[in-house]
Structure formats: structure tokens, C-alpha cells
Amino acid sequence: MPRRPADNLTMDLFEVPTPVSPRPGALLIGQQLRSLISDLLKASPLNRYEVAAKMSELVGHEITKNQLDSWTAESREGWRFPLEYLPALEVVLETHAITAWLADLRGARLSVGREALEAQLGKVSRMKDELSQQEKAIKRLLGEGA
């Protein structure tokens, strides 16, 4: 099984994400995205030819090593990584780092697998507590006691 790149973008459980302030230019993320994709490609045990081939298989048409190079090269300003390829890239690289980074930019947090289920369980538990409190309040209003 290929080694997964270190995920330096996953937040601590109690870290509250804060969206990027809506200042002009604050969300000009092209260079950061190029750098992140480049770092993930470097950390992968797969070479760029292998990444391109696996992505091609997942999206159903050819993606080339040259395209990967162009999407990550600082000198290729006119080239942009297509969002439609993001799921395929993350699957091939076995990461959620880019999705997590994008979520963080918007003040959100990405939860995957067990973490997502645990978050949902916590939400259900809070909802049950709130409903129980409402039930008690209604019973008090009806004179039924708590």
C-alpha cells in the first residue's frame, strides 16, 4: 500500500476554523493551490506519470504528466487546476488535504469517515438533550410536573 503524505492541514479537534476575511484579494489562492498540489505530488510514492494515468482512469479521459506539471508550475500562470479533477487527484494521492484546506478557507471543517459519524452522533445527542428540555418545559406549562 502506498505511503500517505503527511496531512499537515487537518485541524486539531478543538480548533475552531475562521473564514478568510472578505478583503479584496484575500481569496486569490492560485499560488497556494499550486504549491499545495505540488507538495502533495512530491510526497506521493507515485510519480507524475502514474498519478496522471490513474486520474485519467477515474475521470474517463486523458490527463497527462505535462498537464500536472503546468498546473503546478509557478511560471505557467495561465494554467489553472480544474476543480472537476479534484476528487480524482485526492483519490489517487490518498488525501483530503485540498478539500480540508478549501473548507478551512471558508471557516468550515472537513470530517471524514469515523470522525464524520462521531460528529453526527454528537449532533444527535445535543438534539435529544434540547428536545428533552423542551418536553420538560411543556409538561411544566401543562401542570404535569417535570
Image (cartoon, grey):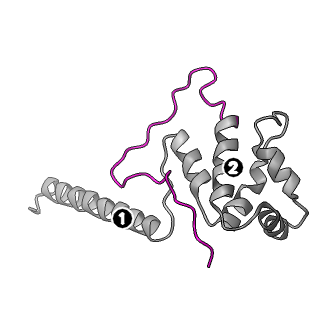
Separation of disc 1 and disc 2 at Cα?
Answer: 39 Å
Q: Amino acid at mark 2?
A: Ser
Majority SS type along the magenta span: loop
Q: Which residue is mark 1?
A: 124
In the displayed structure image, the side of residue 10 where residue 79 appears, left or right: right
In the displayed structure image, the side of residue 36 where residue 59 appears, left or right: right
Q: Quadrant of residue 65?
A: bottom right
Query: Is 87 in the magenta?
Result: no
Q: Position of residue 68 (x, y in %)?
A: 81, 52
In the displayed structure image, the side of residue 7 where residue 124 appears, left or right: left
Q: Secondary structure at mark 1?
A: helix
Q: Position of residue 17 (x, y in %)?
A: 43, 42
The magenta region covers 1-30
Q: Which residue is mark 2?
A: 38
Q: Nearer the viewer, residue 122 or 77?
A: 77
Q: Quadrant of residue 114?
A: bottom left
